[in-house]
Amino acid sequence: MTRDPLSSDSIALDGLSLTPALVTAVAREGKMVRLEEEARARNTAAAAALARLVEEGTPIYGVTTGVGALRSREVPAGERPDHQLRLLRSHAWPQWWSGQTNSAQAAQVCRTSCS
């Protein structure tokens, strides 16, 4: 018998089993999340691969370049460490400003699970 993930103290982010109901539990009900070790290892490997590409000078959308209309603009090396955090904050701001923090939380849990 499979255990209902909603009955657990926290939602496991494993990159495989996130459902709309689990996202809702995090975003609207404040359910805590935990990143499973296998997912953490995949995230670490992905970050290392990305760092190698950046070091090699490969243009990477949203990392070494702007986004949208600014996609052809190179982000200066000194600004890159904070660039993605600034993007996340700028895209989440309308939800935070309007008090709809659940939308931002839903986006963050989905992004973390898919990495």
Image: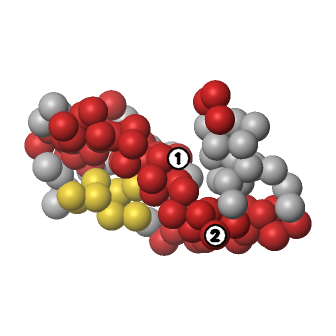
* 96 horizontally vs 91: left or right: left
- In this rendering, the label closer to the viewer, 2 or 1: 2
Residue to which mark 2 is pinned: 78
Query: Residue 55 falls in which quadrant of the image?
Result: bottom right
Quadrant of res 32 = bottom left
On screen, residue 51 above or below 28: below
Q: Secondary structure at mark 1?
A: helix
- Closest to the observer: 63 or 39? 63
**Does 108 sit left or right of 14 as displayed?**
left
Image spot of residue 88 (x, y percent): 43, 47
Q: Residue 41: x percent and y percent?
A: 58, 70
Q: Residues within 10 Å of mark 1 (few under 14, many from 20)?
A: some
Q: Which mark is residue 65?
A: none
Residue nearer the viewer, 111 or 70:
70
Q: Secondary structure at mark 2?
A: helix
The quadrant holding residue 66 is top right
- Residue 1 visible in the picture: no
Name the residue that disc number 1 marks. 114
Q: Amino acid at mark 2?
A: Gly
Q: Is residue 96 above or below residue 3?
A: above
* Chain-order first, disc 2 or disc 1: 2
Q: Position of residue 97 (x, y in %)?
A: 18, 37
